[in-house]
Amino acid sequence: MQWDLFCRVIDNFGDMGVCWRLASDLGHRGHQVRLWVDDASILSWMAPQVSWQHDASLGLETGGGQPGVTVCHWADAESLPADIADDPHPILPGDVVIEAFGCNLPDAFVARMQRPVPPQWVNLEYLSAEDYVERSHGLPSPIWHGPGAGLRKRFFYPGFTPATGGLLREFDLLIRRAAWDAAARQTWLLRRGIAWKPGERVVSIFCYANAPVAALLTQLSTPSAHLSSRDTPSAPPPVTHVLLAHGHATQLAQDWLSSAPQPPFGVRLHPLPALPQAEFDHLLWSCDLNFVRGEDSAVRALWAGQPHVWQIYEQDDGVHADKLNAFMNRWMADWPTDVHEQVTALWKCWNGLAPLPATLPDWSSDTAPWAQHSLTARNTLLKQADLVTQLVQFVSEAG
């Protein structure tokens, strides 16, 4: 099928991250996708394989390099001639048009969706674990006014239950994850100048500007914070490598380091450049504990199967707290009470809803309860069909 996927880059790159992953997955499954985006500069690091050239068939500058995906400028969709007869390179909407996160399609493009058999119009919504998602998934929304009058779009909600649209997951993701062994981890870290040795711990931080990074690093640099069930107080604590995503995490950590009264105990900071999506997965797979932010990285942390802490995007009206609680309760639904309480306390702290716990939950090894229950929760989610499989079925059945 031919898909048109529209994405506006609001802030923090999350919308584009989801849309690029969706477009790429569709392309790998044999579909053709035109990704219309208002700011394609992000792809220079998120998908550096994309290169730009003039497309004679469309009469536009487009980005190629990803199988099945053509990147187009949003402005070109806005400037389509009202009369298609005046267009020397007529662009016709495909079989499916995806409006990502309510971005409002360009009127000129919507007008061309008016045809005897219009394309499937889908509004892809944000991920949420709240109960309303099950009630809202698949609902139609008729268009009464404007160039789309008479058309209908439907809502598609990602989610964690069979009554939702599932989560983005490439068909070979878990195969690649399983093949990521200690040797692959060591090689990947060494390429980034990190001389990791087995037994040393690795943490990644990808966060917003309000994350309590300083408090976390202070705790990690306290000798007692490094002790686990397998350590003894007399043994020297292992080194903890902290891998810092480009942007806020690096700046917050550097601010902490510059104000520290003494060199950090056992903690080594490693600023990273902005990583392409595939490399971000490798980052998560190489760490014992991941701090992530936003929708796309949250889902990738789930599939990584490692202990992780999610920072939700803070909203002025405070509703993010309810969304966070729903996410935690869904992800940790079957966890023992003590593990659930320990991890929940840390998640709330990381989101500014509680103080930092005196001690962190044990994340020292693959056999620690947090790690074991993270894997169990991931395997439960694997029983659900992935988002692209469900989305293709969703539009095919309606057609």
Image (cartoon, rainbow, N blue to C red):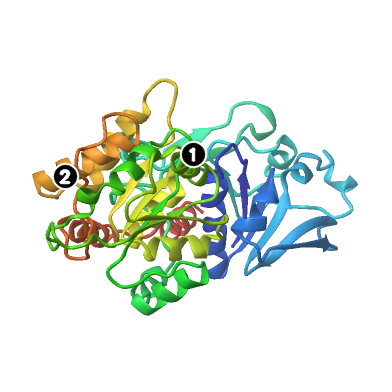
Mark identifier at residue 255: 1
Which percent across, then down, holds residue 5?
Answer: 61, 50
Q: Amino acid at mark 2?
A: His
**296, above or below 189, in the image:** above
Q: CA distance from mark 2 to mark 1?
A: 32 Å
Label 1, secondary structure: give it: helix
Q: Is residue 268 visible?
A: yes
**148, above or below 308, in the image:** above
**316, above or below 163, in the image:** above
Q: Residue at x 69, y 43 (%)?
A: 38
Q: Residue at x 45, y 55 (%)?
A: 391
Front residue of this view, candidates 273 and 172: 273
- What residue is disc 2 on? 340
Front residue of this view, candidates 115 and 84: 84
Residue lying farthest to the front in this orientation: 262
Front residue of this view, candidates 9 and 23: 9
Instruction: Give the left or right position of residue 368, taking residue 279 as reference.
Output: left
Which percent across, then down, holds residue 224?
Answer: 19, 49
Q: Amino acid at mark 1?
A: Asp
Chain-order first, disc 2 or disc 1: 1
Instruction: Give the left or right position of residue 231, taking residue 273 as reference.
Output: left
Instruction: Give the left or right position of residue 194, taking residue 150 as reference.
Output: left
Classify mark 1: residues with Cα within 10 Å, few (<14), some (14-19) or many (20+): few
Q: Residue at x 19, y 43 (%)?
A: 359
Which percent across, then down, holds residue 296?
Answer: 45, 50
Residue 71 sits in quarter: bottom right
